[in-house]
Image (spheres, grey):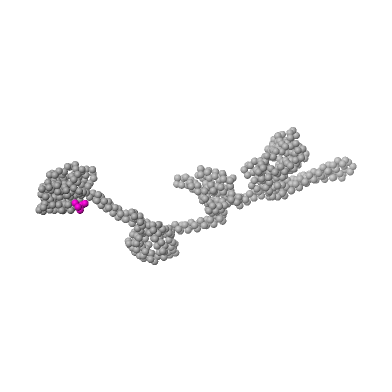
Amino acid sequence: MKNLDENIISDIIMSDDHKILAEQFSILTINSEGYFLLVGNDYKIIAFNDNFHDLYLQYFGLDVSIGDSIIDYTPPERVEEVKIIYSNAFNGIVYKCELDLPLPNEKTIVFKSSYRPAYNAKKEIIGAILHSYDITEYKELEKEKENAQKQIELDNINFRALIDHSPDMIWSFDLNYNLINFNSLFEQYVNAAFNIQVKANHNYIEVLDDYPKRDLFQKATEQAFSGKTFKFIDHNVIDSVELWHEISFNPIFNVDTKKVTGVACISRDITEIKTNEKRLLLSEKRQKQAQTIAGLGSWHFDLKTKISSLSDEALSLFGMKASEFDAQYSTLLKHIHVDDQVIFQNAISEAVLLKKDFSLYYRILKDDNSIVHVFTDTDFEYDDKGNAIGFYGIILDVTERVTKEAELKKLLFLTQKHNEWLNNFTHIVSHNIRSNNNNIKSLVELLIENTEGDRDLLFKMLKTSTNKLDETIYHLSEFVKFQNQNEKNYTLLNLKKEITKSTDGINQHIIKTNSTIINDVSDSINLKVVPAFLESILMNLLTNAIKYRSPDRPLILKYSSEQIEDFCVLTIEDNGIGIDMDKHRNAIFGLFKTFNGNSDSVGLGLFMTKNQVELMQGKIEIESTLGKGTIFKIYFYEKN
């Protein structure tokens, strides 16, 4: 349209008649996008198109009229300049310019204008033609382009500065393998490695001509050309020094077409990382070896994620493999002995609450039902604000130590018992047998001296003494048999059935004494015990209850059971004559201790009962009230 407007101006031949001239001018410019004005040599307006009229009316509020002087519509500060421009046109000089036209709305319109002489048919200058067109949008685009170019130049400077200061080697090339950009580190490397001074547009393939891993780089390039990022680790040994680089080939896409236009490459030196990884792997290997040798494992628990991590040795203690452990705290807890789970959880909760480290002994129950005793020593880790975020520690297998301690404890117990037995044995030999022996010796001497006296009485007394000696020797043999009993001969027995067997054995005596036996022991209780010990315990307590029943009421003997921690507790309760506990408490389980005045009491039964229970790692308790009855509680240890 601009060229069309120029043709209109150059080709127009004006009439000398202003009216005809105006009509002619209007017809020629009616469809033009430009602004046209025709003035005479006297500066008076002859004609203009609608665009020109509307411009002055819209932006300046001036209603331009034919016959007025153009000077009247010119700002005072430009009057002289406009007169000179038109005067030159009147003299045949063409003047072109760009004019910034400030508007009242603080905007500026930029016009490109030309002032040309207007000729009549005789080629005489009869005035001037002003032709303007709005180039504001063009100027704005031009300015944006200029700013964009400046920004590109600035970005290039910044990008160059950035990549030059990068610790990574960076370069890029187009689809023809011509280098586009590269930093100084790449330039130095290529110069040192290949003795090539690289420049922009240098062919990248030539750089790799003698490189041993050219095929790998070529594959990475082809992947990037296809639109995929390709990464690999490059390992080299130079002058006996290992070097690792992580290299990535990344496609460059055209913003508009989305097609690959080149490849951007980054080579990052990861030698330090790889060296540290090797050191860490070696350290972990040595740590695993040390942990295996020491039976020591390590573990870590994240309080936020609830994720646990265990070393291989720790997993072995729990009876798990790495592939079987899902890193969940709940899985870890399931492998802790059910009796120790609450203790374990409470220890952690208390430690978190009080922000203190903790140590703990607990048991691990493996899938094969074997038990591992472990010791955990744990330290907490905290964030910058002092909040506990996790804990880590060691897990030490102390099964052997715990077993040896238990064996030592048992050995000390047995030693103590053997000492007690030895003392009791010495007492029997030195006191009971000696007493009976001296008595017999005196009676024999009296029989020798008294040949005529009451020898029948002496013989009767001698018989009584020998019977007592025989009884003492019998009890002594029972005592020795008890000591020699093999306490390790444990057998699984049903408690209720064993009680029934003991009561059936003296059933006639129970009926004869009008006694009532109540067996409320659970059918499901099975105990590992020494059979001879259990039989002796049940029979001694049963016969004692019948022997010391009350003369005022029939005997009621009740058996019941309950579970208390690691013990099955058998309660045997009777309504017999009872015992004065204030008087006899310390003598109840003593050897040859009697306290009810029965002539047939020996004082061996309860002594043996107590020792048999204790040999099976249990204990016995007694409660009794004189005239009301007695309650025995026998604690059978279930872990035998």
- Relative to residue 78, is residue 638 drawn left or right? right
Q: Residue furthest right?
A: 452
Rendering quarter of residue 505? top right
- Relative to residue 516, is residue 152 drawn left or right? left
Question: Is any atom of residue 336 visible in this view?
Answer: yes
Q: Position of residue 591 (x, y in %)?
A: 73, 43
Rendering quarter of residue 612? top right
Q: Nearer the viewer, residue 22 or 244?
A: 22
In the rendered image, the vertical position of residue 219 relative to residue 570, given as above or below = below
Q: Position of residue 580 (x, y in %)?
A: 71, 36
Number of callouts in the render? Answer: 0
- Is most of the magenta stretch helix, strand or loop? helix
Q: Nearer the viewer, residue 489 or 16?
A: 16
Q: Which segment did they paint magenta?
A: 1-5
- Relative to residue 203, is residue 323 drawn left or right? right
| Residue beneath the point at 42% across and 62% down | 216
Q: Nearer the viewer, residue 371 or 421?
A: 371
Question: Is any atom of residue 622 visible in this view?
Answer: no
| Residue beneath the point at 74% across and 48% down | 481
Q: Position of residue 266 (x, y in %)?
A: 39, 58
In the rendered image, the vertical position of residue 538 relative to residue 551, given as above or below = below
Q: Position of residue 225 (x, y in %)?
A: 38, 59
- Relative to residue 134, is residue 410 drawn left or right? right
- Residue 29 on the magenta span: no
| Residue beneath the point at 70% across and 42% down | 499
| Residue beneath the point at 67% across and 41% down | 521
Q: Residue furthest top?
A: 552
